[in-house]
Amino acid sequence: MALGAAIQADILAGNTTDLLLLDVTPLSLGLETMGGLMDVLLPRNSKIPTKVSRQYTTYKDGQSGMKIAVYQGERDMVKDNRRLAEFNLTGIPGMPAGMPKVEVSFLINADGILVVHARELRSGIEQSIEVKPQYGLKDEDVEKMLLDSMTHAKEDMDIRALTEAKTEAEQLLTTTEKFIQKNFGQLTPQEINETSLAIQALQLALDMNDKNLVQAKTEELNDISRPYAERIMDTAVSKAMAGKKI
């Protein structure tokens, strides 16, 4: 921090001409995603002005809104970072989970103003908000947040890995249960029994908070459900194509 300030002062004084004075983001900027994770869009030390965009989607069928929560910091969980702003993108048309495409853009201008813009690409609904990430942020705050991120690096990495594994497992459980309800009559008693046991095993693994166990039980449920899911989908495609000439 002190070295950077000294170099900037030297440049401003006209003593150094071979270095370009650039403004950068002192801390990373990102969004909260499933499980309370921080998804960084603008890493710290990004040159400004700059713009970046990323696409997100819904995780529930018929979901009509999406919370856009903006955070600043270097930790993997948003609860350990600084919340800057939050708004809800509403009016998303009812679609199956994963179908809506919400593009979120971060535009930070030369004055340090961050414009967060969210737009659902299929319907065109959009909303934006302006925030000033530097407001109320002191050099000591930045240094403390950076130090905390280094001190808790291993712990944060483990928490992120467990959270991502649990999120994937929970999505698989929801998808599998819905698939069985819809196609129950096309499954054999053995397939139903094996799937029920695998679902119970995965639910128990989730309660134990063991990443490796969660991943193993997720893969087991995938292995059991994949063959009959492919069979049912192939049958549906065959029926749909029956009588049609290509």
Image (tube, rainbow, N blue to C red):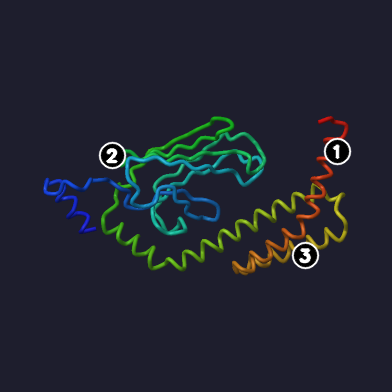
Q: Secondary structure at mark 2?
A: loop
In this view, 197 is above or below 58: below
Question: Mark 1 packing: few (<14 Cα in 10 Å), some, or many (20+)?
Answer: few
Quadrant of the rendered structure where residue 4 is? bottom left
Contact, CB < 8 Å: mark 2 with mark 1? no
User: Mark 3 or 1, which is nearer the eye?
Assistant: 1
Residue 153's spot in the image, x, y percent? 43, 66
Task: Say what amino acid the circle numbered 1 marks.
Answer: Lys
Which residue is found at the position 54% from the left and 39% from the top? Answer: 102
Callout 2 environment at 10 Å: few (<14), some (14 to 19), or many (20+)? few
Q: Earlier in the sequence, mark 3 or mark 1?
A: 3
How far apart are the two marked residues, 2 and 1, measured between alpha carbons? 60 Å
In primary-sequence order, the first of circles 2 and 1 is 2
Tag shown at residue 111: 2
Judge the density around disc 3: few (<14), some (14-19), many (≥20) Cα neighbours within 10 Å.
few
Going by the numbered disc 2, the residue's amino acid type is Asp
* Residue 197: mark: 3
Residue 219 sits in quarter = bottom right
Image quarter hosting the C terminus = top right
